[in-house]
Image (tube, rainbow, N blue to C red):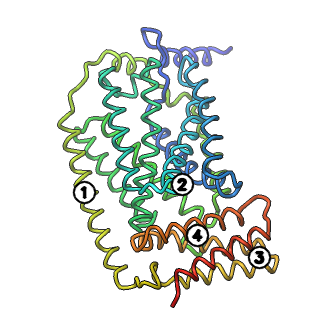
Amino acid sequence: MSKSNTTRNSNINKINTPQNGTLSKVPEVTIYFWIIKILCTTVGETASDFLNVNLGWGLTGTSIAMGICLVAVLFFQFRAKKYIPGIYWLAVVLISILGTLITDILTDSLGVPLEVSTIVFTIALALTFAAWFAMERTLSIHSILTRRRESFYWLAILFTFALGTGAGDLMAESLGLGYLVTGIIVCAVIAAITIAWRLGLDAVLAFWIAYILTRPLGASLGDYLSQTQANGGLGFGASITSVIFLVAILVVVIYLTYTHRDYIPSTTIADAAAEKPFVVVWQVVVVMAVLVIASGTGYYWRSAQLRVQTAAVVTPTSPLGDLSAFRQIAQDTLALVRAGDMSRAKARVGDLEFAWDNAAARLRSMNREKWSSVDDSIDDVLRKLRAVRQDSSACTKSLESLIAIINVLDMR
């Protein structure tokens, strides 16, 4: 081995081995950390859709499979004696997918409103932080040196993804802001938090807020890449978008594995382990108060807008207003299926998904029960048409059922 290589390896060992011999189990927060985190959040959105819809695993099947994979990866993560980029980031990808699925199950399968799930996950995350701090007297990611702290860390990560999914979907779908506007709002909040951190906001508090908010930011990016060009996206689709981002994650992880750019220096670990807990209760109270007031005001204002928009179009014979646009797309798709043009039918049903998602906030506020019946039927159509092995007969029946439901709800 050359002298330069020996010197470099010696420096790496110094970086990663603190005086007490304990190695950090998580990466340093660098630009690479945030790049991979955003990529992971996008994969969580697109990969869960691909497994659930395209492969037809369903929410339950996909959740079970991802849960088993996550348990297996976390087993190796906890067994590891130091931070290993490949294992760590694979766990984050799987948690991203599972966190998305948990929120989707609560919303789509159990009918839990996004408002409720967002509040529940906020409370769960707050309790996790409270228990973590009560037992360890620190929430710093530079102090993940024991299995108990690592357990709290991964539990917090899971709740941040679930909360980010719920809050992001609440803004983009329930309130009808769309992922572009949601992404802009999230970027503005992250920028404000970054400025506040530069001005003295506690680094741990700033980190965890940004960690939560990068999830809806990643979802916005994924939505832009996967949507068709006609619907304002780049048209890559969920499958290709997932592959692109997974490859990007792999490239960055390989780079970090070789360069060790995200290893926490030993001095940082030692300082974090020895530091006395700094009381930032007033900062937490102020920041949380600002976020609650701002989000509550925005929610009330947007909800009032939606109520005004829907009041004029709902009638006893049309509980969801005019559904003719959705019926037309469904009929177009059915005609393509009957003609044997499954490729164009699959593309056309994407227009149905986009149009329905954009109108979801307005329609759900009119009549949640009727909206759910149509939403479930559309999900079934999407699952049939996007299956790896398409069954034209099953697609036809699903589309005919959807059109029948729309006809019943839109009797004019």
Numbered circle sitting on residue 337: 3
Numbered circle sitting on residue 412: none
Q: Nearer the viewer, residue 373 or 49?
A: 373
Q: Earlier in the sequence, mark 4 or mark 2?
A: 2
Q: Nearer the viewer, mark 1 or mark 2?
A: 2
Q: Residue at horizontal 44%, vertical 73%?
A: 363
**Which type of secondary structure does the marked residue at label 3 adopt?**
helix
- Image quadrant for the N terminus? top right
Q: Estimate the spatial distance between the alpha carbons at disc 4 and disc 1, rounded to whole Å.
A: 31 Å
Find disc 1 in the rendering and name its residue.
294
**Which type of secondary structure does the marked residue at label 2 adopt?**
helix
- Label 2 environment density (alpha carbons within 10 Å; few <14, some 14–19, many ≥20): few
Numbered circle sitting on residue 353: 4
Q: Estimate the spatial distance between the alpha carbons at disc 4 and disc 2, rounded to whole Å.
A: 18 Å
Q: Earlier in the sequence, mark 4 or mark 1?
A: 1
| Residue 272 falls in image quadrant | top left
Q: Earlier in the sequence, mark 2 or mark 3?
A: 2
Task: Inspect this view and state whether residue 196 appears.
Answer: yes
Q: Amino acid at mark 1?
A: Ala
Number of numbered labels in the structure image: 4
Q: Are marks 4 and 2 in contact (CB under 8 Å)?
A: no
